[in-house]
Amino acid sequence: MDKFTQLTGVAAPLPIINIDTDMIIPKDYLKTIKRTGLSEGLFAEMRLNEDGSENPDFVLNKPAYREATILVAGDNFGCGSSREHAPWALLDRGIRCVISTSFADIFYNNCFKNGILPVQVSEEELEKLMDDANRGSNAVLTVDLESQTISGPDGGTISFDLDAHKKHCLLNGLDDIGLTMEKVDSIDAYESKLSERAWT
């Protein structure tokens, strides 16, 4: 997966609590195991009208936020079923970072396996970031994973905590397969020993 080091981009405000994985990508879009093309289902019930046309009031349909790479969302983001299609759909849309006060555990862990950084902040910090995100095309945030900081358009900085192992994986673009491949020499040596024992 792609490395995550520093991201500077427009942040879209989504001040809704309990956004579950069915809201992120409805079940009708789960018929594929491909990770591409899922952006068409992202937030479909909010983003699209009944006739399939775009809802102009939904934030990601507004011109200022069409290229947003960061979401600033309400509490308990990613709750509901454990579908990995949810981070796949966000990534397919270009969303690389989601900021909230809390995340559902399975969604949170799935993000790291797919190159998305979920950042947990306090209620006061989220309020400030939500205010920044409401500035339209001027809602530019910089998320620096190495320093674990978020910088706003006014120069203010917020620090966030992150598990060291998860940070290592994102900085180096390592999913579960990548982590395994880091140990390939040890694996090969172990298999060679097993093979030798089988012939003795």
Image (tube, helix red, strand yellow):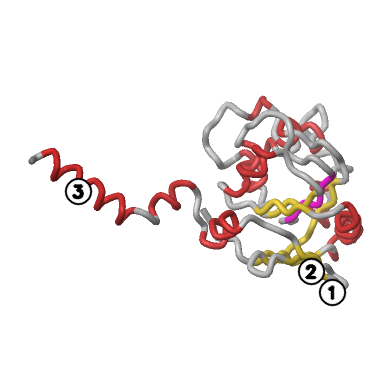
Q: Amino acid at mark 2?
A: Ser
Number of numbered discs on residues: 3
In the picture, residue 44 is in which quadrant? Answer: top right
Whether residues under marks 1 and 3 lie with C-beta atoms below 8 angstroms apart, the answer is no
- Residue that appears at 67% across and 48% down: 93
Relative height, residue 165 to residue 53 (above, below)? below
State the CA–CA distance, disc 1 to disc 3. Answer: 56 Å
Callout 2: few (<14), some (14-19), or many (20+) C-alpha neighbours within 10 Å?
some
Q: CA distance from mark 1 to mark 2?
A: 6 Å
Q: Is residue 72 left or right of residue 145?
A: right
Range of residues picked out in magenta: 70-74
Q: Measuring 52% from the left and 33% from the top, which residue is drawn there?
A: 33
Residue lying at 79% horizontally and 40% vertically, measured from the top left = 76
Give the residue number, with chain letter if any, for mark 2: 151
Q: Return the x and y of residue 19 as percentages of the image width and height.
A: 79, 37
Tell me the tag on residue 155. 1
Comparing labels 1 and 3, the label whose residue is closer to the camera:
3
Relative depth, front residue between 162 and 80 = 162
Considering the image in quadrants, where does the C terminus appear?
A: top left
The type of residue carrying mark 3 is: Ser
Q: Earlier in the sequence, mark 3 or mark 2?
A: 2
Mark 1 in CB contact with mark 2 (< 8 angstroms): yes
Q: Name the residue: 55% across, 30% down.
A: 32
State the residue in front, 66 or 124: 124
Q: Which residue is mark 3?
A: 192
Q: Is residue 44 left or right of residue 4?
A: right
Q: Are marks 3 and 2 in contact (CB under 8 Å)?
A: no
